[in-house]
Amino acid sequence: MGTIRSMLDDAARRFIEEQHMFFVASAPLDANGHVNLSPKGLDTFRILGPTTVAYVDFNGSGVETIAHLKENGRIVLTFCAFQGPPNIFRLYGHGRVVEPHAAEFAALAANFPACESVRSIIVVELTRVTDSCGYGVPLLKYEGERQQLGAWARKQGPEGLRDYRQRKNRRSIDSLPGISE
C-alpha cells in the first residue's frame, strides 16, 4: 500500500527528479465546471523545499489551471514511473499563479532554463504527498523532448505571444478569469 507524507522526503525527491513528465489536475468550484488535466514535460519542474514546488507554465490554447488556481487554489500534481520499478507520486496542495509582471517572478524564474514561451510560474504549497504502486502504468520508452514549443514561440515573437495570450488566455472555458496581462 501507499505511504502518506506531509512533505517531500528523500525517496519522493529522487523519484520525482527522475521523471520526464508529470500531470497537473485542477477544478473550478462550480460542480458544472470542467475538471482539467494537463500533461507537462520539458525541464519545467523544481522542488523548492520540502513543502514547496514550482513549475513553468507555458503559453497554451487554454488557461484552465491558472483560472482554477485564481478561483480556489486546489491542485494535484502526479508523477508516474513509465520506466523502471512501478510507482506513482501525487502532490496535493494549494497553488498560486506568479505572472511575469509580479515582483517575485524573476527570482522564481532563475530556477529554470530561459524560455520564450513562459506565461507564468505555478507555485504549490504541499499539504499531502502520497505514493502508490503504479502496477497499471505501462512501460514506455523516453525518446527525448519535443522542439515545437520553442520554435513556435520564436516564430510568434514577444508581441505575437502577447496577442496570443490576449486572444486565448483571458478566460477559461468556464468563463473564469485567466491571465491578467
Image (tube, rainbow, N blue to C red):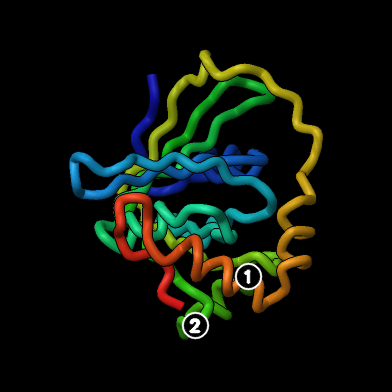
The N terminus lies in which quarter of the figure? top left
Q: Residue at 48% across / 73% down in the picture?
A: 99
Q: Residue at 43% across / 30% down in the picture?
A: 131
Q: Which amino acid type corresponds to the residue marked 2 in the rendered image? A: His
Mark with earlier residue (1, 2): 2
| Furthest-bottom residue in this view | 103
Residue 110 x/y as whole percent = 64, 74
Q: Nearer the viewer, mark 1 or mark 2?
A: 1
Q: Residue at 68% across / 54% down in the picture?
A: 43
Q: In this view, does 142 lie above or below 97?
A: above
Looking at the image, residue 122 sits to the left or right of residue 151; the answer is left
Looking at the image, residue 167 sits to the left or right of residue 150; the answer is left
Q: Residue at 39% across / 35% down in the picture?
A: 130
Q: Classify 10 Å Cα crowding around label 1: few (below 14), some (14-19), many (20 and above).
A: many
Q: Is residue 96 above or below residue 51?
A: below
Looking at the image, residue 49 sits to the left or right of residue 117; the answer is left
Could you say which disc has been placed on residue 49 in the image?
none
**What SS does tag 1 mark?**
helix
Residue tagged 2: 101
Residue tagged 1: 161
Q: Which amino acid type corresponds to the residue marked 1 in the rendered image? A: Leu
